[in-house]
Image (cartoon, helix red, strand yellow):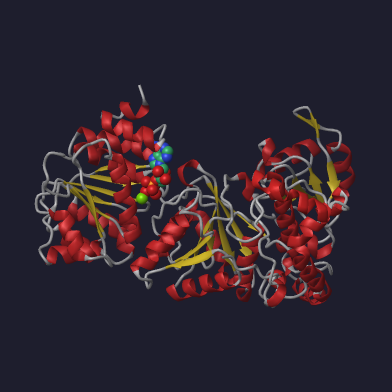
Amino acid sequence: MNKFEQLGLNESLLKAILDLGFENPSEVQEKAIPLLLEKDTDMVALAQTGTGKTAAFGFPLIQKIDADNRNTQALVLSPTRELCLQITNELKNYSKYEKGINVVAVYGGASITEQAREIKRGAQIIVATPGRMQDMINRGLVNIKNIDYCVLDEADEMLNMGFYDDIVSILSDTPDEKSTWLFSATMPQEVARIAKQFMSEPLEITVGAKNSGSSTVSHEFYLVNARDRYEALKRLADANPDIFSVVFCRTKRDTQAIAEKLIEDGYSAAALHGDLSQAQRDGVMKSFRGRQIQMLVATDVAARGIDVDNVTHVVNYQLPDEIETYNHRSGRTGRAGKLGTSIVIVTKSELRKISSIERIIKQKFEEKSIPSGIEICEIQLLHLANKIKDTEVDHEIDNYLPAINNVLEDLSKEELIKKMVSVEFNRFIAYYKKNRDISVSGGERRERGDSEPREFSNNGAVRYFVNIGSRDNFDWMSLKDYLKETLDLGRDDIFKVDVKEGFSFFNTDPQHTDKVMDVLNNVQLEGRRINVEISKNDGGGRRDHNNRGGRRDSGRRDGNFAPRREGGFRGDRNSSRDGGSREGGSRDGGFRGDRNSSRREGGFRSSAPRSENGGSDRAPRRSENFGDNSRPRRSRRD
Ligand code: ADP
Ligand code: MG
């Protein structure tokens, strides 16, 4: 018997679930569904974001609704319009084999008369935002006096958003005998208050530790100077060519400004916040879901609860005021069992907050450094190479080949490759060379920062490249353990472990170098010889800079959407490496637009410390690092 069947769900739902592709119930579903089906009860269900709460109330709700009765039987309240539409859509999917169930969305910004008309036609389930719902009640456009079920979804967020009064007022318009189901990721006092006031002996289910984040999300922070925030964001995007992300800002104004800047710089970005018209918001969400937008810059309110598949990164451009909010943000990624990364761009003065968040999410952050220009360049180049390799040839092209061959026939394969790559990269490389000369100032800055605590620098360490990585089932922790054991070294002797798909980097102090080279080069891992080399590109600050953890390989995720950016390469895997020329890596995404070249200030180098304010470690010391702020401007696409 199918696991969902065991929960007591009926045929039509089971069929719909099959279509949805859900194989097994999630924990909250497993706990909530049988209880809700079995009897009419109040319930408080606490589960992290991304754990499938919608279906946990949606499946039983659909099953319990009387499809032959056209009256409104259930009200689902949700905090935002986006979420409201999302839930409506989900419920429609769940009920697609159940004839006669109508679900209507009610939210601000759209025509109230049209919504009223839809309800009049018979809506057994209304999914509403509290403000609009209150409005409809006031105008007598809706009757919820006889509902059997009321669901408060994302209750914590609704209350965060100041809907307490609306909710209280709406609930008082519903019958006492109804069942109230409250779903929330966290249980702040206001939620408890609602539960106490409006629910009678609710069954309580809690999934995972209260308030803890999803374990499919890894958390990283990048320490930068406040003024380098934006540059850091760009670099992170450049270092993750296939990034598909929600970037959180604190205010609507910042949200708009950052999105505009990104667009101006040629990134595929858009803003989502409450000041946009609803048509604009719809358009943005549609593009984001369709992956025409890689970076959705959003306020907490606007992005709350949004469920878009395969978001690779959540970027906390600024940390939220309320630490609790961090969970809601990071829950936009790592959904449905997929892996995701939550990145925080943080200044030194905010570092305390990281520890507070760690306590709340019960997970550690990994400190990483913003990739250098060299690394980004390499990532993008490999990405291009892989993209070329993976490009499918449309045989239409054959018609043009004779003419093309005519032009290119004298070139050797090597020359041809060089030239092809250069088509995309000349500008970037030019930019890069140019910047290299200026990086002296970066060195100076770094010097200044040398008084940083040791944890922020690793002077004198040796960086290694090793040919094992996440493909061999390592993550940074397990690789560290493996190395420690294999090399018989102490806990702190291996550091800055940075695992890519097919290879990894790590550091030791120089006194361990002989051992590392001797031992590791003579070890086999599942029959494969391990190869370790000293990373060539690890001089001084550069080593510090890179090795601070480095970037996570975005290629491990299934980010297989083609970036819209021009010239985007879709390599895969492996991604960046620590400077130098080796690396088999490649990574999805592409160096799209280095076109327009260095027209703008503010590029690679910007993550170098500019003031006393931390980050000294990331100042490239060597001249090959970018020495000024310019970055190749991405070409604007279409
Ligand atoms: P929450 O409300 O807890 O944040 P959602 O209900 O939005 O989470 O679900 C998150 C994602 O997980 C959605 O994309 C949903 O389709 C998917 N999902 C839910 N339940 C299952 C399941 N049993 N199996 C696979 N995927 C699921
Ligand atoms: Mg939800």
On the image, the x and y values in percent for residue 252 come to 43, 73
Q: Is residue 103 above or below residue 136?
A: above
Residue that sits furthest to the top in the current view: 1
Ligand 1's quadrant is top left
Task: Classify 588 as above or below 56.
Answer: below
Is residue 125 something that shows in the picture?
yes
Horizontal and vertical percent position of residue 158? 30, 60
**Going by the image, does 337 lie left or right of 171?**
right
Which quadrant would residue 84 be assigned to in this image?
bottom left
Res 27 quadrant in image: top left
Percent x, y of residue 264: 57, 73
Q: Looking at the image, which is closer to me, 187 or 108?
A: 108
> Which corner quadrant holds the C terminus?
bottom right
Q: Is residue 236 left or right of residue 577?
A: left
**Percent from the top left, x then y, of residue 25?**
38, 34
Q: Residue at x 41, y 51 (%)?
A: 307
Q: As rendered, which of 78 and 590 lies closer to the eye?
A: 590
Quadrant where the N terminus is found in the figure: top left
Nearer to me, 405 or 586 = 405
